[in-house]
Amino acid sequence: MPLYRFITSNTGDHAVEIECPDDKAARQEARKALAEAAHDALVDADASEMSMTVETEGRVIYQARFSFAASEVN
């Protein structure tokens, strides 16, 4: 199976390499990971910005960016 590099940026870069059957499966995995990271950020903070890039064989196959800001209204 091809090896994909998932790079997450949120106050610093973190990369992991994962084998996936194809580009479509890697994109699905990236969406799931970004959704989980966004969930954790929404629970723990009032503002956050993160991005994810997926690369394989020297090419980018997926990029996403998530940003939010929240405040209490009285």
Image (cartoon, rainbow, N blue to C red):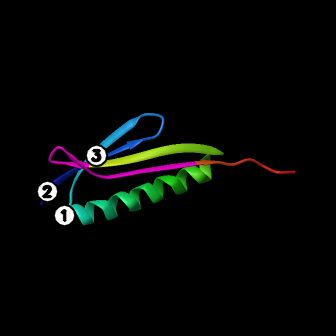
Reply yes or no: does residue 64 show up in magenta.
yes
Q: Label for residue 2?
A: 2
Question: Which amino acid type is marked by label 2?
Answer: Pro
Question: Which amino acid type is marked by label 1?
Answer: Asp
Question: Which amino acid type is marked by label 3?
Answer: Val
Which residue has dot 1 on it?
A: 22
Q: Residue at x 69, y 49 (%)?
A: 70
Q: Which residues are magenta?
A: 55-67
Residue 28 picture quarter: bottom left
Query: Where is residue 59 drawn, in percent x and y?
Result: 20, 47
**Label 1 Cα crowd, 10 Å radius (few <14 / some 14-19 / many 20+):** few
The N terminus, quarter of image: bottom left
C-alpha span from label 3 to label 2: 14 Å
**Label 3 Cα crowd, 10 Å radius (few <14 / some 14-19 / many 20+):** few
Residue 15 picture quarter: top left
Disc with the residue nearer the chain's start (3 vs 2): 2
Asked if disc 3 and disc 2 are in contact, CB closer than 8 Å, the reply is no
Q: Residue at x 21, y 51 (%)?
A: 4
